């Protein structure tokens, strides 16, 4: 997210936390309304996530990031760019894969909470993709399964270097025999 968030990259964690709270487990169904149960109800009534509608638009409807307009707008620009990334779902770009996974999950008989995270897209081959894990425990202390959506990211400085034409990775000089 570095090249999109720029000096606001410090806000990435709190912006993802807002998504994770909206899609997290409902803590106490008798006394609290929220989390995944609320998202299921909102999806049934308003179809917030819909094939053909960008993920960015649906996140905007949820008012994620409203406390810092510049950071929010940069996050939305990042989300709009996800259609330029592949995904771990065959034949789907990152944006379409996220929307499809959320629609499917929210319509299922037992929807899982959703955990949004990020990964370093430079770490290994294939990490430039949006990664979707339909069922797993993304954090060791979670005691239930989640649908996990991981966004590809890189530091702003690395993004600038990668974007410059003709810049190649530094190589070690050949050793003299």
Image (cartoon, rainbow, N blue to C red):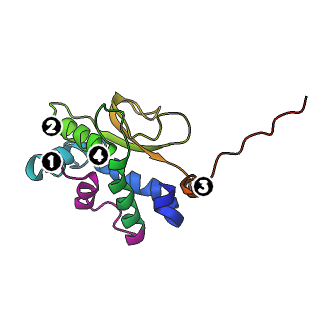
Which residue does the numbered mark 3 point to in the structure image?
161
Observer-nearest residue: 56 or 44?
56
Q: Earlier in the sequence, mark 4 or mark 1?
A: 4
Q: Earlier in the sequence, mark 1 or mark 3?
A: 1
Q: Earlier in the sequence, mark 2 or mark 1?
A: 1
The magenta-colored residue range is 51-70
Q: How far is the residue under mark 1 from the one under mark 3?
A: 41 Å
Residue 40 horizontal side relative to residue 81, left or right: left
Residue 65 in percent (x, y) is at 36, 63
Residue 18 horizontal side relative to residue 173, left or right: left
Q: Is residue 158 magenta?
A: no
Q: Residue at x 36, y 48 (%)?
A: 84
| Quadrant of the frame with the C terminus | top right
Which residue does the numbered mark 1 point to in the structure image?
43
Q: Residue at x 38, y 41 (%)?
A: 130
Q: How far is the residue under mark 3 from the one under mark 2?
A: 42 Å
Q: Nearer the viewer, mark 1 or mark 3?
A: 3
Q: Nearer the viewer, mark 4 or mark 1?
A: 1
Residue 102 horizontal side relative to residue 41, left or right: right
Which residue does the numbered mark 2 point to in the structure image?
107
Which residue does the numbered mark 4 point to in the structure image?
23
Q: Are marks 1 and 3 in contact (CB under 8 Å)?
A: no
């Amino acid at each position: 997210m570095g090249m999109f968030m720029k000096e606001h990259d410090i806000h990435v964690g709190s912006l993802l936390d807002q998504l994770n709270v909206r899609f997290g487990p409902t803590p106490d169904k008798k006394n609290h309304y929220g989390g995944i149960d609320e998202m299921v109800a909102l999806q049934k009534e308003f179809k917030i996530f819909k094939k053909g509608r960008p993920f960015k638009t649906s996140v905007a409807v949820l008012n994620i990031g409203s406390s810092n307009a510049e950071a929010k707008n940069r996050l939305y620009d990042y989300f709009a760019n996800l259609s330029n990334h592949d995904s771990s779902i065959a034949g789907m770009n990152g944006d379409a894969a996220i929307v499809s996974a959320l629609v499917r999950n929210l319509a299922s008989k037992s929807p899982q909470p959703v955990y949004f995270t990020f990964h370093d897209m430079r770490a290994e081959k294939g990490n430039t993709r949006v990664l979707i894990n339909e069922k797993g425990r993304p954090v060791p202390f979670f005691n239930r399964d989640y649908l996990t959506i991981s966004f590809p990211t890189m530091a702003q400085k690395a993004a600038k270097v990668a974007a410059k034409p003709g810049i190649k990775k530094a190589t070690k000089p050949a050793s003299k025999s």
